């Protein structure tokens, strides 16, 4: 998995990747860091370390400098050059401790430098501190992608995630569906009952979405009163059924600020049961066109397009 955005829960045990050509260092660390709430992964060369980093997306890398093949400086350079892993903090662990080596390591992006032989208590403290900082940074990054009013993912997260999911579905030949939702006559709610009433409606729809979707679905607030729902591994028929269920529930909701005045949304769905050669922006455009068809057709409805080719032999065409 090489998502740019890590999705492991906040309380998952952090993985620490140790890259060192010396077997004794791995042995020592696994014994002496054994009591910490971390999982150690070992790599014995720079090449192996870079591969493992991409595979396991560790929370921290402990990196030796002096190694045959790709040395630690080069590993550090490549980590920082690769967007998928560049945010992972790196502590350099080295017997090379000239001021020049230290300055080079810090300039290349290391967060810390610990000399060998190292004091275990000090190393443990530095590992803990780097992990704390990393988890804080991740929380902040995640918070920047969440919509404050509704608690759903925001548009910038949607753009990134949608692009990734469209690529992933095509590569692995998986089903994928997308829905765009837009509240009907939302301006009237705001104009008649005030903006707090409008906010309550946006939050109400978000609550229904969060409750009804599965863990793998991604609900986003796309814009003012527009929402998007990414449904990985979901056929267009299943996506349509889900959206229609949400539509019916939302229509039946009671609003304390305007009892007797129901609110509805229109919805456009586009999905495929197999990987299809449709780019993310085009796919979004098809869902959007369905949304507008739903509006024109009288609102409060779901219109879906199945992008699955009829002849499976043509699936991978284009
Ligand atoms: Mg070495």
Image (cartoon, helix red, strand yellow):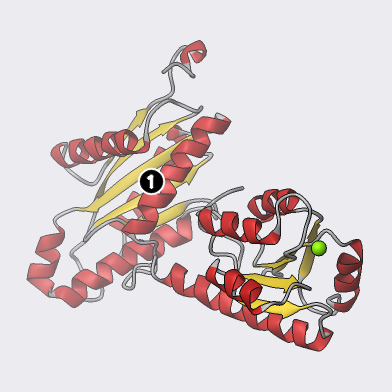
- Nearest the eye: 128 or 215: 128
- Nearest the eye: 65 or 243: 65
Residue drawn at point x = 78 percent, y = 67 percent: 39
Measuring from the top left, give residue 314's x and y in whole percent. Answer: 47, 13
Work out whether residue 148 can be spotted. Answer: yes
* Quadrant holding the C terminus: top left
**Is 151 placed above or below 221 here?**
below
Measuring from the top left, give residue 285's x and y in whole percent. Answer: 26, 37
**Is 176 placed above or below 39 here?**
above
Within-10-Å neighbours for mark 1: few <14, some 14–19, many 20+: many
Position of 225 compared to 4: left or right?
Answer: left
Ligand 1's quadrant is bottom right
Measuring from the top left, give residue 219's x and y in whole percent. Answer: 41, 56
Residue drawn at point x = 90 percent, y = 72 percent: 28
- Nearest the eye: 167 or 24: 24
- Nearest the eye: 25 or 206: 25
**Is 315 placed above or below 129 here?**
above
Image quadrant of residue 260?
bottom left
Is ligand 1 within 8 Å of the beta carbon of the residue shown at mark 1? no
Q: Residue furthest left?
A: 191
Residue drawn at point x = 36 percent, y = 63 percent: 206
Position of 260 compared to 69: left or right?
Answer: left
What residue is pinned by disc 1? 243
Residue drawn at point x = 57 percent, y = 79 percent: 133
Image quadrant of residue 227?
bottom left
Measuring from the top left, give residue 292's x and y in whole percent. Answer: 18, 39
Local secondary structure at mark 1: helix
Q: How many marks?
A: 1
């Amino acid at each position: 998995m090489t998502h740019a955005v890590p999705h492991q829960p906040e309380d998952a045990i952090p993985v620490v990747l140790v890259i060192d050509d010396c077997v004794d260092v791995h042995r020592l660390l696994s014994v002496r860091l054994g009591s910490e709430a971390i999982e150690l992964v070992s790599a014995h060369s720079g090449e192996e370390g870079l591969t493992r980093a991409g595979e396991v997306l560790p929370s921290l890398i402990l990196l030796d400098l002096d190694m045959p093949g790709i040395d630690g400086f080069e590993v550090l350079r490549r980590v920082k050059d690769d967007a998928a892993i560049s945010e992972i903090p790196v502590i350099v662990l080295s017997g090379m401790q000239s001021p020049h080596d230290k300055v080079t390591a810090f300039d290349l992006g290391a967060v810390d430098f610990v000399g060998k032989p190292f004091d275990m208590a000090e190393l443990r403290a530095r590992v803990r501190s780097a992990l704390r900082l990393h988890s804080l940074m991740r929380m902040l990054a995640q918070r920047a992608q969440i919509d404050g009013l509704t608690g759903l993912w925001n548009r910038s997260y949607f753009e990134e995630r949608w692009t990734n999911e469209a690529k992933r579905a095509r590569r692995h030949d998986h089903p994928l569906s997308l829905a765009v939702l837009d509240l009907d006559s939302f301006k009237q709610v705001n104009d008649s009952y005030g903006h707090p009433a409008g906010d309550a409606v946006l939050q109400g729809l978000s609550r229904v979405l969060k409750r009804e979707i599965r863990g793998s679905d991604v609900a986003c607030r796309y814009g003012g009163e527009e929402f998007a729902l990414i449904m990985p591994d979901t056929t267009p028929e299943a996506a349509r059924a889900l959206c229609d269920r949400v539509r019916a529930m939302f229509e039946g909701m009671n609003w304390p600020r305007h009892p007797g005045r129901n609110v509805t949304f229109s919805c456009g769905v586009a999905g495929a049961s197999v990987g299809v050669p449709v780019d993310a922006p085009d796919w979004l455009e098809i869902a959007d066109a369905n949304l507008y068809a739903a509006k024109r057709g009288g609102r409060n409805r779901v219109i879906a397009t199945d992008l699955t080719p009829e002849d499976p032999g043509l699936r991978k065409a284009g």
